[in-house]
Each structure stands twice: as C-alpha cells, then as structure tokens.
Amino acid sequence: MLLSLLMAVLAEGDAELIKRLQSRDPQALAEIYDRYGRVAYALILRVVRDAAIAEDLVQETFLRVWNRAQGFDAERGAFGPWLLSVARNRAIDYLRSASGRERNAIEWEDVDHPSLYTNMERDILASDDARVIRAALLKLTPQQREVIELAYYEGLTQTEMAERMGQPLGTVKTWVRTALKNLRDELGVAVPA
Amino acid sequence: MTHEELQGQYELYAMGVSEDPERSEIREHLNRGCEVCMKEMRRARQVASMIGASSAPIGASSAPAAPSAKLRRRILASVGAEQRGFGWSPWLGLAAALSLVGAFYFEARERSSLEELAAVRSQMRQQAVDLTRLNEAMTIMNGADTRQVNFGAGPKGKVFVNPASGVLLIATNLPPAPAGKAYEMWVIPKGAKPVPAGLFQSQADGTAMHVRTGPLDMNGVTIAVTLEDQAGAAQPTSAILMVATLQ
C-alpha cells in the first residue's frame, strides 16, 4: 500500500491506470482515489464549505469518472485536470441549485467532457506546480484575485460578480481580463501544438 | 469577433461562466474546428485546473483537509468493489460446535492463537516500519524547498530532493535484483565522489522506493543507482542504471 500510494505520483503510470479503469477494474478506481481523492475533496470543500456535502460530491465525482472513463484518451489525456474539472463542476452545480440560481446555459458536457482534456500538462499535483500557482495568485491585486475566485469557486458570471461586488460591469471585466492575462503570464502555461 | 477580442474569455468558457455574445462566439468557433480557439481552450483548461489544484494545501505547513476514511469505502462499494462486512452468524454457530470438543483441542487452539498473535505482531511491526518510511517520504515530497527531477530510459521514475530532509527515489521498470545483489543509491555532490545512500530492492512488479534521510547540499547534486552486492559497496562497482542531476 505504501509503495502503491507513492507510485501514484508517477504520471507515467496514468495511462496504464486509465486503461484498467476503462476495463472496469475497481482497484484502478481505488488507486485513482488515493491519488486524487484529497485534492478533489479540498477543492469541493472550498466551494460548498460543508464536509458532509463535500464527501457526497466527491463520491459523485468519482462515480462520474468511473462511468465516463471510456471517453478518455488514455495515451494523450490529462487525467488530473479532467477529474478536477468534474469535481469543481459538481460542486458549482450543487451551489447553484442550493442557492436557487439558474444553472448556466452551458451544459457541463461542453466543459468537462473527457475528450477535451488532451495534450495538456498532466501532472498538476507536483508540489513545484502548486507553489507556482499560489505564488501567481498572490501576485494578483485583491480585486483581481477576488474575481478569479468568484468565477472558479462560486461559478459566477461577470454580470453576477458585478452585482455581488457592487461594481460596474466594465470594471469587473477589466479586472477579470487583467487577472487572467497575469495568471497566464505567471504560470507560463505551455500547451503542446 | 476576433480572437484578440476573445482573449480572457476562454478561461471563463472553460469554467462554464462565460456569457453571450462571447460564449456563443467561442462555441461557434469550436464547432467549426477553429484551431486557434481549440489551442486557446486547452490553455484555458490548464489554467483552470491549476487553480483547482491549488485548493489542496500541497506542501503547506497547515494540516490539509482530508475526507473521512469511510468515503473511500463508500465510493468503492458503489462500483461493486464492496468488501463484505464481517458475518457473525456462522462464527456463532462454529463457537457453539466448538464448545462440545475436548480440552486438548483448546490447548491446540491456544497454541495456534499464539502463533497467529505472533504473526499479527510481526505484521504490525512491518506496518510501523512502512508508516515511518511513508512519513519520511511525505516529508521529503511535501517540503517547501523540495525539488524533483525525472529520470528515464529503462528504469524510470522521479527523485525528490529536500536540503533538510533528504532524498526520495521512486522507480518503475526496475527488475528485482539477482540473488545476492541489491540496488544501491548514491548521492554525488557536485565535483565530488559518490557517497553511499543506502541499499534497496525492487518489487516483483518492477517498482521501487528508497528514502535516504538527512540534510544534503542540493547545488548540482546527482542521484544515481547501481547494482551491487547485497552487502553494499563504498564506491560504485557497476554501470549506473539511473541518474538524475539537479540543475
């Protein structure tokens, strides 16, 4: 168990793991949970702020991954980003229903379909990356950071952000645009052609 | 709408929070296979997933949020990998039957129980050793100053180096060493001779993990592995199987 847990950090092992998941091997799901369970939980908890609900949504996330893994490209796919996207979208979906907000007109199918997560940096859990991300977020101004957090962790549109913050829509749009540009520059996000 | 005008909208689309007219515009570009937009969307998904990954306090000093142990069982049970609960009824019946057998049987059972107890103790000791290694490995992996480097070709994997805690090596595709042999890790400070950093074996499936605790100078240090006699060597005596250098 010790070794299997640590081996999970090897991104090279993902393809084999995904193939096992696609062949409905529950042990593969267990290994994927050991690798991503905590980060998915942390992300969902940050959105819903309730441990019991977060656990339900983590379960929903892994079931969705289990049921939709067939559509994932085991060789070129970036599993971690896909799973986090599913986790985050489940949490936002819950938040929207719980607060009586309209669900977004974009179906999640458009944004977390497994086939979309290809040709990306795969190992998003490397500790170096986590440090870089936090540093990049900390470099944003408080307003820029807030709009990014409202979009990502609360699923607010720019119009909804403007209402929440009591700011003109144009101002919010400027903060969002600048924040995202700065994040891209800081993260140096490389995408294979 | 030009691609220039859509800049900053791709991430919002990836997060499912974009609004019209940009949302429809991006969707239309994607539907007609616009390569610029597809590339921008990959980049946007990358940014979004990196924000999500930063929710977990990896390498942070504060205790990370962790789900309960029950959740793992719940998830596995829901896909049909449920571990059956311990059934008491058959054992109660067995206990009733056992009450009929003679004293000599109980003596034999007692001996057997003592052996089982010894086996459990041995297993617990091994688990304690594993836990210690796990703690050491996690300390190195999650250290604020930890750096990692990949190595590959033949045996491949990652090396994590922390200046205060030590070195963690994780490898795959490393066949079990022949009888009487073991793998030996070396820490090679820049411009200096290799220093032995412990012996280890790989598993039957070719995976291996080795931890060398204690501080080291990370500047230009190289981590290498060779195959040596199981007693170990003071200096490498065979070809290097894996090598990773921190730049």
Image (cartoon, grey):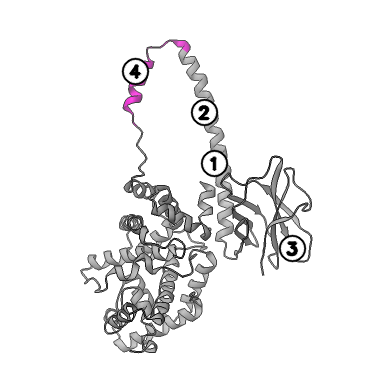
Q: What amino acid type should be assigned to the residue bearing mark 3?
A: Pro
**Residue B78 at x, y = what percent?**
32, 48
Give the CA distance from mark 3 to mark 4: 68 Å
- Same chain? Circles 3 and 4: yes
Q: What is the chain identity of the residue bearing mark 3?
A: B
Q: How many residues crowd around disc 4 within 10 Å: few (fewer than 14), some, or many (20 or more)?
A: few
Residue range corresponding to the magenta coloring = B87-104
Q: What is the chain identity of the residue bearing mark 2?
A: B
Give the CA distance from mark 4 to mark 2: 23 Å
Q: What amino acid type should be assigned to the residue bearing mark 1?
A: Gln
Residue of label 4:
B96
Q: What amino acid type should be assigned to the residue bearing mark 2?
A: Leu
- Quarter of the picture containing the N terminus of chain B is bottom left
Q: Which residue lies furthest to the front in this view?
A: B32
Residue of label 2:
B117
Q: Residue B127 carries which label?
A: 1
Which is nearer the N-term, disc 3 or disc 2? 2
Give the CA distance from mark 3 to mark 2: 47 Å
Q: Which mark is residue B189?
A: 3
